[in-house]
Image (cartoon, coloured by chain):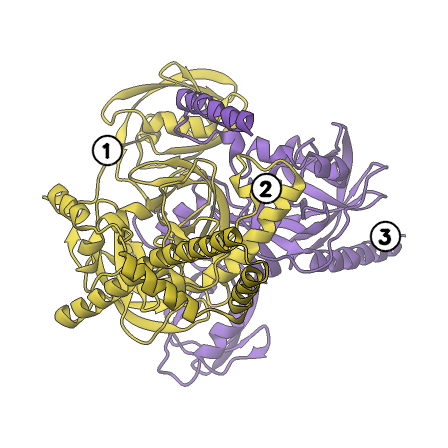
Chain colours: A yellow, B purple
C-alpha cells in the first residue's frame, strides 16, 4: 500500500525538459532579446556593423553576422532553460494556490529556492578537500561557518505542541516547517512557533510518518517568514562538513539558537549520522550542508557523542504529498535494541563502567560501577564506543559473557541481554 | 592537450576502482571533527602552548587541567575539582611537581594554584569577543590538543540550577505565607510550618511570595539562608539550607532529559551559575576543564570551567578570567602578608 503510493508519486513527478523551439519562435525570441538589449549591447552591435561597412569584405561580414547569430542563439537557449525553471515554479505555486483553494489549507508545493534568506553561493576550496590540512584551511571553515550560522539561524524555530517542545526549520516564506513525528505526534494539533528573535506564530501539525520520524507543520498566520531552502543528499559524502542548529533543552529567551559543527559519519537510508552532538529539545531542528541548505532533521541519539541521528531530507520529498495532506501513517519502529543498562568511558584495559542502571540486566547480574570490561563473548574491548557497539549487536534474550576487572581482580559474569525501545 | 585529456580519462577508472574496493560505510574516527587527523593540524599550536598547561592530580588521580598565568608558576583551575588530598602538577614533558591551592573564588568556581616549577610559559590572552562558529581548541600537555569544537553560543550569563528552601507558597495571601512544607528539603528540617509568614531573607525584607521567589533565586545549592518568620504572634529566625530537588532518573520528565544530557559524557559537579560564559560544543571529560580554550592564533579566548552536558562545555571568557586572576593574586598576597 505504502509502496504503491510512493511509486505513483514518482511516476507523476514531472521532470522539466527543454522545449524544442521552432525557427519562428527563435526569431521572435531573438528579436525580444535584441529589443531588450542594454546600451552596451547596442554599442557592440553598431561597432560590428561599422567594421563591416568600412572594409566591405564579404567574408568578414558573413563571419560577423554568423557570430552574432550564434551569440544570439546561445542567449536564447539560456533564457529557455531559465524560463522553463521559472515557469515550472510558477505553475507549481499556481497549482498549490488552487489546491489550497479547494482544500482550504495545506496544499503541496516545492518551496521556491530563489527567495531564500542569504545563502553563500561559492564554497571555499577546503570543503571539497577530503580533509583540512592547514590552519588556514581551518580558518576558512571558521569564516564560512560563522557567516552561515548568522544567515540560516533566522529560519530555525521552537515548536510547542501540547506539553512537548522541539525544534523545526521554516522552508518556505508562507511558513512550511520541517520537524519530527515524535514532537508533533498527530496531525491537526495546534502549534506555537517561536522564532529566534522572540516572535511567536500560531500554526498546526500536518502529515506525520512515524516510521521515519518525519513530520510537516505549517504556520497559519502572518508571513512572509524567514526560511532556508531544502537541499539534497544525492551528492553527500562521508566526511562532509555539516552544521546542526536547534534549541537543546528547549527554548531559552536568554540564549540564541545553539550551533554545533560536525561531519557526516554514516549515510543510511533511515538516518544520517553525524558527530554534531544533539540532545532533547533539538528534535526537529535542521542539519545544514555548507551551502546552508537543509539535508537532515534531528531525530535521535545514542550513548556515544558520535551517535547523533538525523532524518534524511530525501524522505520528506519522497512522501511530500502525504505530509502536505496531513496524513498520519507508519509504525514507530521498535527494534529490539540489545540493552545491558551500562555506560562507560575509555580505559586502557577496555571500558570502565560509570553508570549501571538499577533496573537493567547488568545490575541484576551484580555488575558494579567501576568495573572494567575487558572482553565481551571473548572479543577484546578497546574503547567505550566499541563496548556499546558490541552490546547493541547482541540479540535480546541471549546470554553474554563479560570478562571484567574489579578492584584489580579478574572476574567473569554472565548477563542476560534485555531489549529497549530506541531512545531520543 | 591530448595528453592531459588522456591522463584525466585514465585516472578516472583507477580512482573508481580503489574507491569501490575500500568504500567504507563509516567515516574513520580519525576524520571526525575532533579526530586525530584534524587535531594533527594543530600540532604547531600545541607545541607553542603546552607549557602553558598543567595537568592536576589529587592523590594520583587527574582531576583537572590548569592554565598558567605567569612564569613564577601561578595557574588558574576549576575550584570545585580541587578535592582534599595531595595536589601535584604534571608538566609538558612528563615531569610531576608539587602544587598548592592558594586562593579560591567561589562565585566563579576558579582556584589560584601555585605550581613549584620554573620556565613555565604564561598563556597569551586573546583580544576581542569570542564569536559563534569560531574554532575552540582545548590544549593539553601533549603534542596535539585534547579536543576541538566550535563556539556555539555568544557570551552570556549562566544561571545556577534553581535551589529551593522547600515550601509551597499561598499565592492568594498578600504576604509570603507558606501553604505547605515539602518533604525532604531544608524547610522541613528547619521546622517550618504551613501558615508561617516569611518576612525576611538574610535581613532583606520580603513583602510577598513573588519577592521571596526572586530573592531566593540568588542562592545556590548548599548555601544557608537566615529566614525571618512570623508564626502567630511570635517572631522567629531560622537557618535553612538551599537544596535542588533530585529526580529519580526514571520515566519521563526532567529526569529523562537529565539522563539524555549526560549520555556520552560525564557532567562536572558544578556546571551552572557563571556570571559570563562562552558555550562551545567540544566534547570534554569533566577532568579536562580548568585549562585554556584557544583560538587558531593559539591565544586564550577563555578557560574551560565546566562540562555542562552532552552538547555543551562552558568557558569563562578571557577578560573575566584575567580579572579573577588579578583579584585572586591580590587576595593571596594580602593573606601571606597577614600570615607574616
Say which chain tag 1 marks: A
Q: Residues within 10 Å of mark 1 (few under 14, many from 20)?
A: some
Residue lying farthest to the left in this orientation? A1
Say which chain tag 3 marks: B
Marks 2 and 3: in contact by CB < 8 Å? no
Badge 1 and badge 2 both on one subunit: no
Query: Can you identify the residue that label 3 sits on?
Result: B336
Query: Which residue is pictured at 75% across the width and 33% down the height?
Result: B91
Horizontal and vertical percent for residue A161? 28, 63
Query: Can you identify the residue that label 1 sits on?
Result: A336
Left or right relative to A245: residue A48: right
Between disc 3 and disc 1, the foreground one is: 1
Query: Which residue is pictured at 37% across the width and 79% down the height?
Result: B171
In the rendered image, which quarter is residue A26 located in?
A: bottom left
Marks 1 and 3: in contact by CB < 8 Å? no
Residue A377 visible (yes or no) = yes
Report the front residue among B299 and A171.
A171
What is the C-alpha distance between the residues marked 3 and 1?
A: 64 Å
Left or right relative to A319: residue A119: right
In the rendered image, which quarter is residue A156 located in?
A: bottom left
Q: Number of marks in the image?
A: 3
Residue lying farthest to the bottom in this orientation? B174
Amino acid at each position: 500500500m505504502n509502496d504503491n503510493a510512493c511509486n505513483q508519486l514518482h511516476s507523476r513527478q514531472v521532470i522539466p525538459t527543454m522545449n524544442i523551439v521552432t525557427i519562428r519562435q527563435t526569431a521572435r525570441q531573438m528579436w525580444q532579446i535584441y529589443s531588450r538589449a542594454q546600451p552596451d549591447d547596442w554599442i557592440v552591435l553598431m561597432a560590428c556593423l561599422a567594421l563591416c561597412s568600412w572594409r566591405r569584405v564579404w567574408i568578414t561580414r558573413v563571419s560577423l553576422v554568423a557570430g552574432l547569430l550564434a551569440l544570439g542563439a546561445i542567449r536564447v537557449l539560456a533564457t529557455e532553460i531559465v524560463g522553463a525553471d521559472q515557469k515550472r515554479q510558477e505553475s507549481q505555486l499556481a497549482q498549490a494556490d488552487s489546491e489550497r483553494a479547494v482544500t482550504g489549507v495545506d496544499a503541496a508545493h516545492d518551496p521556491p529556492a530563489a527567495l531564500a534568506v542569504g545563502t553563500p553561493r561559492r564554497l571555499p576550496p577546503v570543503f571539497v578537500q577530503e580533509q583540512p590540512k592547514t590552519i588556514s584551511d581551518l580558518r576558512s571553515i571558521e569564516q564560512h561557518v560563522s557567516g552561515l550560522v548568522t544567515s540560516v539561524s533566522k529560519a530555525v524555530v521552537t515548536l510547542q505542541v501540547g506539553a512537548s517542545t522541539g525544534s523545526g526549520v521554516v522552508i518556505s516564506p508562507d511558513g512550511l516547517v520541517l520537524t519530527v513525528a515524535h514532537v508533533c505526534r498527530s496531525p491537526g494539533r495546534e502549534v506555537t512557533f517561536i522564532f529566534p528573535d522572540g516572535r511567536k506564530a500560531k500554526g498546526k501539525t500536518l502529515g506525520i510518518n512515524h516510521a521515519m520520524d518525519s513530520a510537516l507543520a505549517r504556520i497559519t498566520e502572518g508571513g512572509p517568514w524567514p526560511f532556508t531552502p531544502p537541499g539534497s543528499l544525492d551528492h553527500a559524502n562521508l566526511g562532509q562538513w555539516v552544521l546542526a542548529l536547534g534549541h537543546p533543552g528547549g527554548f531559552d529567551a536568554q540564549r540564541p539558537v545553539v550551533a554545533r559543527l560536525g561531519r557526516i559519519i554514516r549515510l543510511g537510508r533511515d538516518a544520517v549520522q553525524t558527530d554534531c552532538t544533539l540532545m532533547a529539545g533539538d528534535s526537529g531542528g535542521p542539519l545544514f550542508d555548507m551551502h546552508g541548505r537543509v539535508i537532515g532533521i534531528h531525530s535521535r541519539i545514542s550513548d556515544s557523542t558520535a551517535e547523533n541521528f538525523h532524518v534524511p531530507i530525501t524522505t520528506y520529498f519522497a512522501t511530500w504529498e502525504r505530509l502536505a495532506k496531513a496524513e498520519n501513517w507508519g509504525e514507530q519502529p521498535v527494534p529490539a535494541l540489545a540493552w545491558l543498562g551500562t555506560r562507560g568511558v575509555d580505559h586502557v584495559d577496555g571500558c570502565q563502567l560509570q553508570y549501571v542502571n538499577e533496573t537493567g540486566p547488568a545490575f541484576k547480574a551484580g555488575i558494579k560501577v567501576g568495573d572494567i570490561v575487558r572482553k565481551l563473548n571473548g572479543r577484546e574491548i578497546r574503547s567505550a564506543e566499541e563496548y556499546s557497539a558490541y552490546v547493541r549487536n547482541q540479540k535480546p534474550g541471549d546470554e553474554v559473557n563479560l570478562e571484567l576487572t574489579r578492584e584489580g581482580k579478574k572476574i567473569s559474569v554472565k548477563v542476560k541481554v534485555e531489549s529497549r525501545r530506541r531512545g531520543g | 592537450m591530448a595528453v592531459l585529456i588522456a591522463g584525466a580519462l585514465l585516472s578516472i577508472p583507477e580512482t573508481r576502482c580503489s574507491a569501490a574496493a575500500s568504500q567504507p560505510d563509516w567515516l574513520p574516527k580519525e576524520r571526525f571533527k575532533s579526530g586525530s587527523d584534524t587535531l594533527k593540524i594543530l600540532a604547531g599550536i600545541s607545541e607553542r602552548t603546552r607549557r602553558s598547561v598543567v595537568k592536576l592530580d589529587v592523590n594520583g588521580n587527574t582531576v583537572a587541567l590548569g592554565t598558567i598565568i605567569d612564569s613564577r608558576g601561578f595557574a588558574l583551575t576549576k575550584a570545585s575539582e580541587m578535592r582534599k588530598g595531595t595536589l601535584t602538577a604534571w608538566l609538558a614533558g612528563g615531569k610531576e611537581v608539587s602544587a598548592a591551592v592558594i586562593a579560591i573564588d567561589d562565585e566563579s568556581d576558579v582556584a589560584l594554584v601555585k605550581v613549584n616549577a620554573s620556565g613555565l610559559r604564561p598563556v597569551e590572552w586573546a583580544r576581542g569577543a569570542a564569536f559563534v562558529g569560531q574554532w575552540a581548541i582545548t590544549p593539553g600537555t601533549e603534542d596535539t590538543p585534547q579536543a576541538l569544537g566550535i563556539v556555539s553560543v555568544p557570551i552570556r550569563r549562566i544561571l545556577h540550577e534553581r535551589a529551593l528552601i522547600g515550601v509551597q507558597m499561598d499565592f492568594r495571601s498578600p504576604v509570603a505565607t507558606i501553604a505547605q512544607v515539602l518533604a525532604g528539603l531544608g524547610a522541613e528540617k528547619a521546622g517550618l510550618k504551613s501558615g508561617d509568614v516569611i518576612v525576611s531573607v538574610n535581613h532583606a525584607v520580603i513583602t510577598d511570595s513573588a519577592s521571596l521567589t526572586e530573592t531566593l533565586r540568588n542562592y545556590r545549592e548548599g548555601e544557608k539562608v537566615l529566614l525571618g518568620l512570623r508564626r502567630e504572634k511570635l517572631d522567629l529566625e531560622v537557618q535553612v539550607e538551599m537544596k535542588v530537588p533530585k529526580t529519580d532518573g526514571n520515566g519521563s520528565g526532567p529526569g529523562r532529559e537529565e539522563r539524555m544530557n549526560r549520555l556520552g559524557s560525564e557532567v562536572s559537579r558544578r556546571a551552572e551559575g557563571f556570571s559570563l560564559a562562552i558555550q562551545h560544543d567540544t566534547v570534554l571529560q569533566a577532568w579536562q576543564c580548568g585549562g585554556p580554550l584557544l583560538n587558531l592564533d593559539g591565544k586564550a579566548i577563555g578557560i574551560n570551567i565546566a562540562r555542562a552536558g552532552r552538547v555543551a562545555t562552558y568557558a569563562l571568557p578571557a577578560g573575566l578570567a584575567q580579572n579573577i586572576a588579578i583579584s585572586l593574586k591580590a587576595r593571596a598576597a594580602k593573606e601571606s602578608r597577614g600570615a607574616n
